[in-house]
Amino acid sequence: MKDIILRHGETFSLKVIPHSGRTELKEINGVLKLYLRSPPEKNKANMELIKFFKKEYGLVVEIMSGLTSREKVMRIVR
């Protein structure tokens, strides 16, 4: 994903795999999958997702839909 240019206000979807033992973003068959170490309880996986994009890509993102789902729609805030 580092070679993809994303701009302010753009949205993208991804599938989150929580409690996977690693934190890694992969594109598999055209689908972005984000593997997270955190469990999907008490919003821990969602918080790790937001921190991941800030740390790895310098992007501030918000979850537009899918707060309690593995299928998420994200929007780039800046």
Image (cartoon, grey):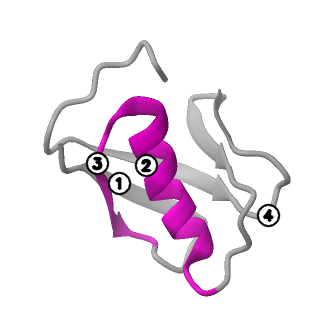
Instruction: Tell me the residue that label 3 is attached to.
Output: 60
15 lies left or right of 35:
left
Of callouts 1 and 2, the N-terminal one: 2
- What is the crowding at mark 3: few (fewer than 14 residues within 10 Å), some, or many (at least 20)? some
Of callouts 1 and 3, the N-terminal one: 3
In percent of width and height, residue 9 lies at 14, 45
Marks 1 and 3, Cα distance to the nearest angstrom?
A: 10 Å
Instruction: Tell me the residue that label 4 is attached to.
Output: 19
User: Given this view, does label 2 or label 3 mark the residue nearer the observer?
Assistant: 3
Q: Is residue 44 above or below residue 17?
A: below
Please check the rendered image and state whether residue 62 is part of the magenta-colored stretch, yes or no: yes
Tell me, yes or no, whether the two marked residues, 1 and 3, touch with CB atoms within 8 Å. Answer: no
- The secondary element bearing badge 4 is classed as loop
Of callouts 1 and 4, the N-terminal one: 4
Which corner quadrant of the image does residue 31 belong to?
top right
Q: Which residues are magenta?
A: 42-66
Identify the mark at residue 74; answer none if there is no mark.
1
User: Amino acid under label 2?
Assistant: Ser
